Image (cartoon, rainbow, N blue to C red):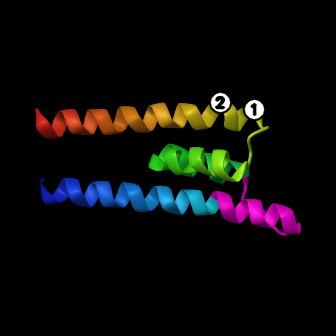
Amino acid sequence: MEIALIIALSVYIVWNFVTFFMYKRDKDKAKSGAWRTPESTLIAVAFFMGAMGAFLGMRILRHKTQHIKFKVLIPLAMVVNLAVIGASAFFIFV
């Protein structure tokens, strides 16, 4: 594997862990009544290649699962993320 591909994959994985823990932190703050992360921020990090972490945060933590915009936008972010990965792979390997 090319070193750039390994670095890109590592950054992608770390970013999705960060995204997942952003959802966890927001869930914890919701339980305690503390200041929350804005929904726009949670959705934005999903679109910036963190959709898998956001999706897992929703499913595992049961967070934001009743909000229509999250039900629609997080899967859309996953499609966008996959399209970016696919296009990147195409241009790298072709």
At 28% across and 33% down in the image, what residue appears?
87
> Closer to the camera, 85 or 62?
62
- Name the residue that disc number 1 marks: 68
The outermost residue toward the front is: 60
Left or right? Give the position of 49 relative to 54.
left
> Any mark on residue 72, and which?
2
CA neighbours of label 1 inside 10 A, class few (<14), some (14 to 19), many (20+): few
Question: Residue 3's spot in the image, x, y percent?
Answer: 15, 60
At 55% across and 31% down in the image, what residue appears?
76
Question: Residue 11's spot in the image, x, y percent?
Answer: 35, 60
> Any mark on residue 12, and which?
none
The part of the image, by quadrant, that contains residue 25 is bottom right
What is the C-alpha distance between the residues marked 2 and 1?
Answer: 6 Å
Indicate yes or no whether the magenta region holds residue 3.
no
Indicate yes or no whether the magenta region holds residue 26.
yes
Q: Disc 2, disc 1: CB below 8 Å?
A: yes
Question: Residue 53's spot in the image, x, y percent?
Answer: 53, 51
Left or right? Give the position of 28 relative to 90.
right
- SS under mark 2: helix
- SS under mark 1: helix
Left or right? Give the position of 68 relative to 9.
right
Question: Residue 62's spot in the image, x, y percent?
Answer: 73, 48
At 12% across and 53% down in the image, what residue appears?
1
Q: What's drawn in magenta, residue-wise?
A: 23-38
CA neighbours of label 2 inside 10 A, class few (<14), some (14 to 19), many (20+): few
The outermost residue toward the right is: 33
